[in-house]
Image: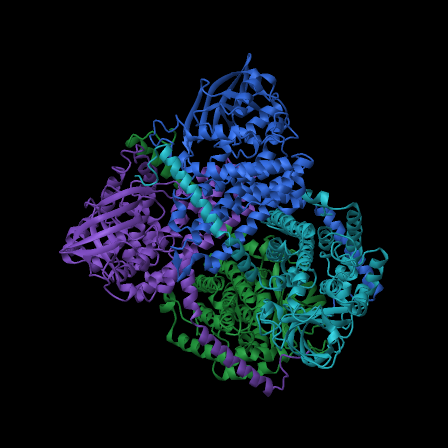
Chain colours: A cyan, B green, C purple, D blue
Amino acid sequence: MPYEIPAIVQDRVSPRAREYLKKIEHFVETECIPADEVYEAQISKDPALRWKSYPPVIDELKKKARSQGLWNLFLSKTHYSEGAGFTNLEYGLMAEILGRCHVASEAMNCSAPDTGNMEVLAKYGDAAQKKRWLEPLLDGRIRSAFLMTERFAASSDARNINMRMREDGNDLVLNGTKWWSSGACDPRCAVYIVMCKSEKNTSSDPFKQQSVVLVPAGTPGVTVVRALSVFGYDDAPHGHAEVRFENVRVPKSNLVLGEGRGFEIIQGRLGPGRIHHCMRSIGAAERALDHMIARVNDPARQTFGKPISEHGTIRTWIAESRIAIDSCRLVVLNAADKIDRNDAKAALKEIAMAKIVVPRTVCDILDKAIQAHGAGGVCQDFPLARMYAGLRTLRIADGPDEVHLAQMGRNENARAAEVTARLQRQEARRDELFRLYKIEGRSQL
Amino acid sequence: MPYEIPAIVQDRVSPRAREYLKKIEHFVETECIPADEVYEAQISKDPALRWKSYPPVIDELKKKARSQGLWNLFLSKTHYSEGAGFTNLEYGLMAEILGRCHVASEAMNCSAPDTGNMEVLAKYGDAAQKKRWLEPLLDGRIRSAFLMTERFAASSDARNINMRMREDGNDLVLNGTKWWSSGACDPRCAVYIVMCKSEKNTSSDPFKQQSVVLVPAGTPGVTVVRALSVFGYDDAPHGHAEVRFENVRVPKSNLVLGEGRGFEIIQGRLGPGRIHHCMRSIGAAERALDHMIARVNDPARQTFGKPISEHGTIRTWIAESRIAIDSCRLVVLNAADKIDRNDAKAALKEIAMAKIVVPRTVCDILDKAIQAHGAGGVCQDFPLARMYAGLRTLRIADGPDEVHLAQMGRNENARAAEVTARLQRQEARRDELFRLYKIEGRSQL
Amino acid sequence: MPYEIPAIVQDRVSPRAREYLKKIEHFVETECIPADEVYEAQISKDPALRWKSYPPVIDELKKKARSQGLWNLFLSKTHYSEGAGFTNLEYGLMAEILGRCHVASEAMNCSAPDTGNMEVLAKYGDAAQKKRWLEPLLDGRIRSAFLMTERFAASSDARNINMRMREDGNDLVLNGTKWWSSGACDPRCAVYIVMCKSEKNTSSDPFKQQSVVLVPAGTPGVTVVRALSVFGYDDAPHGHAEVRFENVRVPKSNLVLGEGRGFEIIQGRLGPGRIHHCMRSIGAAERALDHMIARVNDPARQTFGKPISEHGTIRTWIAESRIAIDSCRLVVLNAADKIDRNDAKAALKEIAMAKIVVPRTVCDILDKAIQAHGAGGVCQDFPLARMYAGLRTLRIADGPDEVHLAQMGRNENARAAEVTARLQRQEARRDELFRLYKIEGRSQL
Amino acid sequence: MPYEIPAIVQDRVSPRAREYLKKIEHFVETECIPADEVYEAQISKDPALRWKSYPPVIDELKKKARSQGLWNLFLSKTHYSEGAGFTNLEYGLMAEILGRCHVASEAMNCSAPDTGNMEVLAKYGDAAQKKRWLEPLLDGRIRSAFLMTERFAASSDARNINMRMREDGNDLVLNGTKWWSSGACDPRCAVYIVMCKSEKNTSSDPFKQQSVVLVPAGTPGVTVVRALSVFGYDDAPHGHAEVRFENVRVPKSNLVLGEGRGFEIIQGRLGPGRIHHCMRSIGAAERALDHMIARVNDPARQTFGKPISEHGTIRTWIAESRIAIDSCRLVVLNAADKIDRNDAKAALKEIAMAKIVVPRTVCDILDKAIQAHGAGGVCQDFPLARMYAGLRTLRIADGPDEVHLAQMGRNENARAAEVTARLQRQEARRDELFRLYKIEGRSQL
């Protein structure tokens, strides 16, 4: 089993978390991974049924997982009373194991976007909202979607959101179109958490003009227009929806936290969510490496007269993958640990690093694993191409890498004045030493 | 229009070819590219019909193309009397334009694997074979498949082929399984060109044990088992089939060229085919670059307060893409020109270079174009993700990059004795000069 | 011998050029390469003499080269009556062979910056200037330097030049400091070609404020302040000088072409010079690949129980180097050919591509060759580290890669309006087809 | 100040170590960095004196450092009674700060190869050896060299060592040649720690045929043949020597630990040494990033009408450098922590990762910093080119990257049997589920 807790965090993982890690790993390896293809096969290919049903195997897995206490592990102990009591670092290690497999997160009620949505409700929802939405979500009876991204705006910057919200008596009326609303195609999806913008100018602060509203699925005026594909995958039954809102009306009590608080809510949602995504991605990379190793040691496949595993290029891929995975894990755990020690805001830089570096590194590992499988790698016989499609999308979701790099570059560059002053002090001292030692200086032939 | 013939081949392109290039470009840009999404939409989503029909729009396009003389342009003038009269270099330039678009190659009856199969029949088929199969293929009435790759063998080395062929009276009997038989799912596919291995030992030479046999679609014992997907795309109606042969019986007259000549046939097929693939890939890259440029100049999309096209990173992507495309084009045209001046065997090294360098370079450009489109880039709204899936597969088809690199490394390394001797002569002369000029040599503090 | 003219330019190389290529290659391989270490050893290590002498072996080589007609090959036939009569493409192929070796260019009077300076004088100098400077340069009796770069300006943009020029009677008076004045440390250097800026405002056009002035070495007020090193190499006797001008006075007749014509002169100088640099770089890469191959086949060196050349990683390096070298050569030759067919201005894009892509590619090859040599690779026992230092600097000289990439990105992005309009026309036609075929369009679940 | 202890190791750094870190940083930034150019300027350029003197400034710095208790910090608390009492992790953080600067390590008596040599003597030396060599080394009165690498062998594998040792009465007699004996050119170098091979067959185990012998500098028969350069740097006064041994005779009491124990000694020496090198490299990267930031914010340098720091490409370099540095630091600290928790042998994998990933990453950062400085970056005006030369060599020293990657690939690939069995169990379970849920399986069209 490749799994080993890195030296540097040994002291940060409680005995209880270690016990859970073992149970989770056993459940994922023996129950969930074998069920991945079953899940896939049980999705209807009939276009009339494809988005109206879901694979029965998942209910079985959920039952089993819950009976072992492997349920809702994600709510970190520091922030939510409903939580399972683990730190972000501990749950990070668990999320990695979940990420080895397609169905494991859902089986343990730890799958996005429900996790982030439950965090929002737990942290910002009022009692009625919790009662109506958080409870069945925690219970795994319904699912949910988070509607943020818009097609015709650079919506990674929340200020660009176009979905309009206006008050009308005791109601809120929404108009606009969202896309990449992941999970909104699922027949079990019962609520949309919608980011919108007040029509009236609530505030001159551009970060205080957004609001988060809870919209029950099936509310009149809501149309799930179509499912977007990721490469050629439609990710049924989950799906990535384009959703149109035409005069959609919900009571004001469906507003979360208050008007103009949308930005605040989304900020609180992102940090731990990115840690989860990153750690699951690392689990995907471990699975890919497993497959790569198994493949290149298949005695039936020889090229140039020797097993593929003896070719230097492949050996290097294996070594590089191991290094890349282990490095990424440390980067994410360090970010998780900083959230645990402080909070997500303090760990902004560390979280951004993880968000940038992990998806692209894992994409690269998946790409090598695909290549090692030949034509098998791109098709349905291995989980590799599908994982690639998902990971590739992570380099875009929540803002493309380049936006995060630009931001991080700007922050790091803010040291300029301090650095320049320091270098100048050092040069002054150097010139002093030059005089002291009677050195003529730089300009001599 | 990005299209311009590179300086270095200006003298190698005839006025007639230039005239065709213009007509092709006009037809592709105004008729074919707009039809890509129509073609996609006309493929049935009903699983019962998906592999039993094909999009009507293609027949319209074929009619139009043929009426303009844009038909069967691929057969190079030096090798086939049936040919359109262009050199490999000239058709290469045409193939690039075809490659900008999904439907253009088929519209002009220039799509793989039919092109390679027609080359095989034109070059190696006997009169009866030509009459029965080449004529309707050239006429665009039927389609064909080439069955080479096998699931449980490293079949990029033809010696590893497992499909068995035995004689039985006047018949040949085939047993085995092929996969990645592209086009074999198409309802119009009428013939399989099958690479198989004689059961009896025809020759001690491992390169003379393979034979090529023509098997009509629908022959008893043939089962198209399933369609393989490429990153989630099933590429209907074309498809990539797994095909099972159980005691499939065809007359001996269906053998091409003669028993044990399979390796010779496949070698002759590969060279120009790789040039076509590479040039089409370059066309795909040009299309992707067009989309990238259009996207980043969309006035509605601004980040950090300026149009995306003004961000330095994007500018660099655009420049790097232009350099990469233009470099790749020269590499492929040089290989095509060497085929024209000599033959495919003489151009082995140049063809291999193109085969290695083009798909990976174009993958990289497509990946950047996807990234520049945000979430739009991975979905069905742009041709990018689909082109990526196809190009990524080219890095594996006909042997993964690594096999070609290893081969090329071995060939280049064969210079070792000559190089070593030359360096030693130079060192001897150096030492002579050291003595002449009374230099003590290297070993002095 | 690795040398072979690419297929694609076979028709562009005259029999006379082919004959010269053979003679040059023989001279370089048998006389020049063995002399490289002799040249190095003959440079005085005594700081008092280091910049006052030069290696005697070079005079012997010059004599030999000249006696074989291998002299001043660089002046292209289209532009200079003094030229050797070769095209830029032909001389490019020759320059590649020169580049395999440190001393060959100088031995055949084809070394920078003299070549570019002779081009300037041949093209823009008046009769007296030619008599005094061009003749002895063509004769190999003196050397020269080109003084452009300045320490405290982003001087890759000529508009930022700070060196001041003012008129005083019949004289011009120069003040300022230049650095990276390559060759100015050489005791044979007799003239500086100096880019300066008029103190009085000669023109409102920022590209017409610069002038080129000829300053004899030793003119009062000129101080060669120090030699700059390149990764620890001082490149004696040539050297890269920092040069101070304090009220340096030369007659007005030393002005080249006329006041305010500096930008025009430098533009004319750059194109072919970049081709030469690139082709020499490719020669360096070929030499490095030779050394890599010899090294990894040394029977005395085995790791993991087999010769290094049998390790897959090394094989891949060799193959990748071959591909990279051959690709780069095509890129440069295409640019040279475009200059020959039109002129340097028409070939701006092609020259920029070569300038960007070649140095970084060759750096990468050199880096791999160094790595293949272990510790030997970084020291004086092989030419690799030294070539690396030179090539690395080429990524900065005449403007860093990033400036050229930004410029090329801007130019390519200028297609935006045309591309956008074309894509919109295609979308309109697509929608027309959608209506014609009664397709509902993109928005359907 | 860029320095901040990563979240994940906050608990592993004692208050005393934190206090030292502050003092070290202050001393390095205010005293050592300004002295770097002084040290360089004080090295004699006269070839007769270059290797017979050393820069006076270093003695001043040593005095100052020692007076502040900043002395011999490297000996880790777990292994040596002579140590300063810090863990490997804590000293790692200190070494990073030392690495920002050329002279700091020597100033605090923490420079290689003395550190490794002192570790050898402290761990394996007998009382007399400690008295004669360890004491003056710990006192900073002498320096030392480690003679391992040989010119004509792949000596990264100690079994290939050719230096012969034979017994003669009470003496040991050594014959052979070493190179890259770093520090052996220094006039203060008083002892060579020499790896040699017994002439008589001491053991059939190829790892028990090497011995380590202490040879005083100046012993008859020892010739320091020449100094090797690294790129163009000779690294005087330290230097990298080629050393010839001709019948060099030392008493048997100069043998360390015993005959045939050489491999054991060298293994013990390598682990912590690699941690030190890596952490110093990270310090070099931080210094380079400081310089890059200062440079691109220099108001005098603008390109394309804006400060260089506002160009997206540069911003990305800064962000990528920050990410790369912080990731590398975690990788090395994790390895150091594993040594502290267990020992170097247990941390083999983690140390190898650091050894592979850090030098190449830092090379890349240095390369970008050089590029950001234009021509200034490659010359003596900034520490960048020199640091690059040193870091580039680290990718070769102690075995090239490729050897370590191959080894790590082999170790990781050893999981093949376990992985294959696990995947097969999962497939069996999948097939079971297929039967249970009546799924036909993979083979269906």
Residue nearer the viewer, A403 or C193 = A403
Quadrant of the snapshot with the C terminus of chain A? top left
How many numbered markers are drawn? 0
| Residue C163 seen by the camera | yes
The residue that appears at 23% across and 54% down in the rendered structure is: C118
Give the image quarter of residue C377. top left
Give the image quarter of residue B239. bottom right
Tell me where residue C44 appears, x and y as whole percent.
29, 34
Tell me where residue A409 appears, x and y as whole percent.
52, 56
Which residue in the rendered view is the most extreme toward the top? D169
- Examine the rendered structure and indicate whether residue B180 appears above or below residue D216: below
- Examine the rendered structure and indicate whether residue A224 appears above or below residue C143: below
Which residue in the rendered view is the most extreme toward the front? A203
Tell me where residue C158 appears, x and y as whole percent.
31, 58
Q: Is C249 left or right of A330, judged from the image as shown?
A: left
Residue nearer the viewer, A61 or A303 = A61
Residue nearer the viewer, D373 or B290 = D373
| Residue A215 seen by the camera | no
Residue nearer the viewer, C333 or A341 = A341
Tell me where residue A121 appears, x and y as whole percent.
75, 65
